[in-house]
Amino acid sequence: MVQEKKIKIGFDLDGVIIGRPPLVPRGLLERLFRGTKDSGLIYRFPTGKRHQWLRKISHHYFFRPPIKDNLAFLKKISQDPSFEIYLISGRYSFLAKETTRWLVKRELAGKVSRVFINEIDLPPHIFKKKIIKKLELEFYFEDDDQIVAFLRKEVPQTKTYWVDSKSFDFFRIIGQ
Ligand SMILES: [Mg+2]
């Protein structure tokens, strides 16, 4: 019997599965964590201890509600043997613990094939490109339109889709 090849799918975390802190305007987050919208793919790596600490606090699961429908959906397809699910986040190394804790708390830990976080602190889009290429993903879901454009150009063999915090029609998108 020929075993059917699994479909490899990757998801970004923040903005796709993990929501942003309530009451903090998106514009402010963007100003803190990357340049302004017009400066393109420029990210600020927080070097100072206080900045890293601030960012750690803001990534505590308490301040990061799940995007409920997307999380529920992800749990569901993770049980489907026809898919191999990867989580690929640009979060820097110092957020590893917060990220693991979030995934445990939301009962997603252990349900996906592998979780990649940006442990070598590359610019997030470069990190994502590297992992997506290595895994030879068929699909990748991302909420940052500039990263989507970058990945479509750099890794054309993977179909990268822009999604937002509203639940997305996954099966329609991947045409299953
Ligand atoms: Mg994101």
Image (cartoon, rainbow, N blue to C red):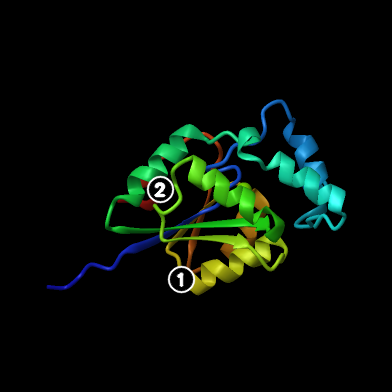
Q: Is residue 123 left or right of residue 81?
A: right
Nearer the observer, 38 or 113? 113
Residue under label 2: 173
Can you say whether 73 is above or below 148 in the image? above
Residue 3 locus on image (x, y percent): 20, 70
Q: Quadrant of the N terminus?
A: bottom left
**Mark 2 CB within 8 Å of ligand 1:** no
**Mark 1 CB within 8 Å of ligand 1:** no
The amino acid marked with disc number 1 is: Glu
Residue under label 1: 136
Examine the rendering and report whether any part of residue 35 can be seen.
no
> Dot 1, how many residues are within 10 Å of its Cα: few (below 14), some (14-19), or many (20+)?
some
Can you say whether 23 is above or below 127 in the image? above
Examine the rendering and report whether any part of residue 117 can be seen.
yes
Residue 117 locus on image (x, y percent): 60, 60
Q: Is residue 67 left or right of residue 172?
A: right
Question: Of helix, strand and loop, which one carries label 1?
Answer: loop
Q: Quadrant of residue 32?
A: top right
Question: Of helix, strand and loop, which one carries label 2?
Answer: helix
| Image point (66%, 40%), residue name | 60
The amino acid marked with disc number 2 is: Ile
> Dot 2, how many residues are within 10 Å of its Cα: few (below 14), some (14-19), or many (20+)?
few
Furthest residue toward top: 23
The image shows a total of numbered marks equal to 2
Q: CA distance from mark 1 to mark 2?
A: 18 Å
Residue 5 locus on image (x, y percent): 28, 68
